[in-house]
Image (cartoon, rainbow, N blue to C red):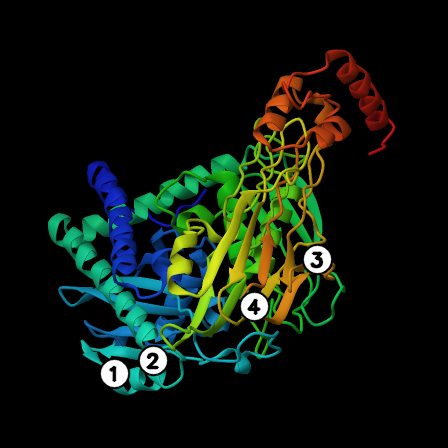
């Protein structure tokens, strides 16, 4: 096994630097949150900060969205190629939101700052954050990148410490709420300057070469750990398949997802050649996201607790992502809802290797942000607003040895939060009528899938509601005989009557008046193992807690529970479970 570095690093300094770079990226996160203007940053935490080597390799990232792990590194490398080392100066800050570089939508604005130590370029500080508005059309399904908002090429926001005011003014003229956009921009500047200042303090205290040697050693250690863990996966070729509901344009036309995983010794190849071609609707993402899908899945399988997250963890991973796929789209493919398909690809990678390493994967999860939004004019402030609650959270799949977690944000969004209802109620004209776990939404199994969530929001003033939610029909699958979970769904209440019979969970521009409401329901997680093997007392407790109804307990788990005392009818349960086991042996159910 060849490592990237033959340097000899001091082991004590290496451990100090390991924790030091984590602390730097965490402080970058904290300062961004404290100074940002939009709740999607300081409440939902839709951002990522990071430190990178002078070549653009990831040193440490403060996880917000795992899918940024590749996009940020590639953005740094692209800026290096664009500006060239000879054109970089201390005090520079570079900006872009190019979707085909970052892999995501135009709302993700990335700032990068070179870190010079005694005149030598030592590293880069970087921050990618979600702006609530970047211009473009409101609502609807876009069909090209040009309708999605302002595109910022590789530019210098600061040149040798001097602000490019012309660029700032240009941005101000092209967004709907400029005070908030520019407030978030300044917050990002604060974050990258924090990274520069704190990393320079590390270099001053321990010396530039010892710190860089320590970083190389950390990456080598991460590589060694990942390779050793990969060796525990049986060699072979593993195929996983799933699908997405549609692209928002051709309603009901499924989008195929097919992955091929090859394990050979200490290396793994994730091949996305057979994933769907890019689509007409705005569910595409750039090629860096295709690579990130493989990296996120690989990290989960091989070194989930190895920190800091750095490029050494992925030296034993090969990814095949041809251009023109739904996760490697080329211009002018629309990208506004870029985040939806990648998380199902990660899910499908787990599904592919589930037979080989059943103790290290989960059943399918709800795999969507469930971030329905609304907009209008606030009657109190007379200002235009965007309303959202951030990711709703839903059910995660069960594992071989434990139940899935409930009401948890999807894998694409890592550290992002499902925001407090009161925050949206204070800032926008809405009231949250209901926020609850959904009974029977988790897939039945020996270990039950996590539960989904329902949020019902009532309008206090006219607003326009939109949702672009996926996985209504591709429901989270179970493993080893576990059952699938409920899918994601939406409903509207207009003039007191609920409408639920939509072809999918997408809703384009529904006008709601005061008293009308919308409901968003996240799916659950798939179950693991036959449901009739779940301990009867555990099923009874599920019924008592309201996680499973008495009807489903009898129908799927074979447990007959008294709904007053929550005791198990042992005789009736034994009879019902014998019937379920017989049906299972015959492939029924």
Q: Give the mark nearer the N terminus: 3 vs 4.
A: 4
**CA gap, disc 4 and disc 1:** 37 Å
Precedes in sequence: disc 2 or disc 1? 2
Residue 135 in the image, given as x and y percentages of width and height: 45, 79
Q: Is residue 9 left or right of residue 47?
A: left
Q: Secondary structure at mark 2?
A: strand
Q: Is residue 303 above or below residue 469?
A: above
Q: CA distance from mark 2 to mark 1?
A: 9 Å
Q: Which residue is mark 1?
A: 164
Which comes sooner in the sequence, label 2 or label 4?
Answer: 2
Frontmost residue, 271 versus 510: 510
- Labels 2, 4: front one: 4
3D distance between C-alphas at marks 2 and 4: 35 Å
Q: Residue at x 60, y 27 (%)?
A: 542
Position of the C terminus by quadrant:
top right
Q: Earlier in the sequence, mark 2 or mark 3?
A: 2
**How many numbered discs?**
4
Residue 211 image label: none
Q: Residues within 10 Å of mark 3 (few under 14, many from 20)?
A: some
* Mark linked to residue 500: 3
Whether residues under marks 3 and 4 lie with C-beta atoms below 8 angstroms apart, the answer is no
The answer to whether marks 2 and 1 mark residues whose Cβ atoms lie closer than 8 Å is: yes
Question: In the image, which is nearer the foreground, mark 3 or mark 1?
Answer: 3
Residue drawn at (58%, 67%), measured in percent from left and top?
Answer: 466
Q: Which mark is residue 465?
A: 4
- Name the residue tied to disc 2: 155
Residue 358 visible somewhere in the drawing: yes
**Mark closest to the chain's N terminus, 3 or 1:** 1
């Amino acid at each position: 096994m060849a490592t990237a570095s033959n340097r000899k690093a001091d082991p004590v300094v290496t451990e100090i630097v390991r924790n030091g770079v984590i602390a730097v990226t965490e402080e970058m996160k904290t300062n961004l949150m404290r100074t940002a203007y939009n709740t999607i940053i300081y409440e939902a935490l839709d951002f990522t900060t990071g430190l990178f080597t002078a070549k653009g390799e990831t040193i440490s990232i403060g996880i917000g969205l795992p899918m940024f792990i590749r996009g940020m590194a590639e953005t740094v490398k692209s800026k290096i190629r664009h500006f060239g080392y000879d054109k970089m100066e201390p005090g520079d800050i570079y900006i872009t939101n190019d979707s085909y570089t970052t892999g995501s939508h135009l709302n993700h604005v990335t700032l990068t700052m070179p870190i010079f130590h005694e005149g030598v370029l030592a590293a880069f500080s970087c921050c990618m954050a979600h702006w609530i508005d970047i211009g473009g059309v409101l609502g609807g399904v876009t069909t090209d990148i040009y309708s999605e908002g302002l595109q910022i090429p590789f530019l210098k926001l600061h040149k040798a410490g001097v602000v490019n005011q012309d660029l700032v003014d240009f941005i101000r003229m092209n967004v709907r709420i400029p005070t908030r956009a520019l407030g978030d921009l300044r917050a990002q500047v604060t974050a990258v300057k924090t990274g520069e200042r704190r990393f320079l303090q590390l270099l001053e205290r321990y010396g530039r070469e010892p710190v860089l040697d320590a970083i190389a050693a950390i990456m080598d250690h991460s590589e060694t750990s990942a390779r050793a863990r990969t060796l525990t996966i049986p060699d072979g070729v593993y195929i996983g398949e799933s699908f997405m509901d549609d692209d928002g344009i051709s309603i009901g036309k499924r989008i195929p997802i097919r992955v091929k995983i090859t394990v050979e010794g200490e290396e793994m190849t994730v091949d996305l050649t057979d994933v769907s071609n890019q689509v007409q609707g705005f569910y595409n993402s750039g090629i860096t996201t295709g690579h990130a899908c493989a990296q996120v899945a690989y990290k989960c399988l091989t070194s989930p607790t190895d920190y800091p997250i750095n490029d050494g963890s992925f030296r034993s991973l090969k990814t095949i992502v041809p251009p023109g796929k739904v996760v490697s789209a080329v211009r002018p493919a629309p990208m506004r809802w870029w985040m939806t398909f990648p998380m199902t690809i990660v899910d499908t990678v787990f599904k592919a290797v589930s037979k080989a390493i059943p103790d290290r994967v989960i059943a399918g999860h709800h795999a969507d942000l469930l971030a329905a939004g609304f907009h209008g004019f606030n009657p109190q402030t007379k200002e235009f607003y965007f309303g959202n609650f951030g990711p709703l959270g839903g059910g995660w799949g069960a594992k071989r040895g434990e139940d899935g977690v409930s009401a948890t944000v999807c894998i694409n969004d890592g550290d992002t939060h499902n925001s407090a209802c009161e925050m949206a109620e204070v800032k926008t004209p809405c009231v949250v009528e209901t926020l609850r776990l959904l009974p029977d939404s988790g897939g039945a199994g020996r270990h039950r899938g996590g539960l989904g969530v329902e949020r019902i929001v009532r309008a206090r003033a006219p607003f326009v509601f939109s949702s672009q939610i996926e996985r209504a029909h591709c429901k989270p699958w179970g493993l080893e005989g576990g059952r699938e979970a409920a899918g994601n769904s939406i409903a509207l209440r207009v003039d007191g009557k609920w409408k639920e019979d939509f072809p999918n969970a997408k809703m384009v521009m529904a006008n709601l008046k005061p008293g009308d409401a919308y409901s968003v329901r996240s799916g659950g997680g798939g179950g693991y193992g036959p449901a009739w093997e779940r301990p009867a007392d555990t099923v009874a407790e599920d019924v008592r807690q309201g996680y499973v109804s008495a009807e489903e307990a009898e129908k799927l788990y074979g447990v007959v529970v008294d709904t007053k005392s929550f005791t198990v009818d042992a005789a009736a349960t034994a009879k019902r479970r014998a019937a379920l086991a017989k049906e299972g042996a015959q492939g029924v159910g």
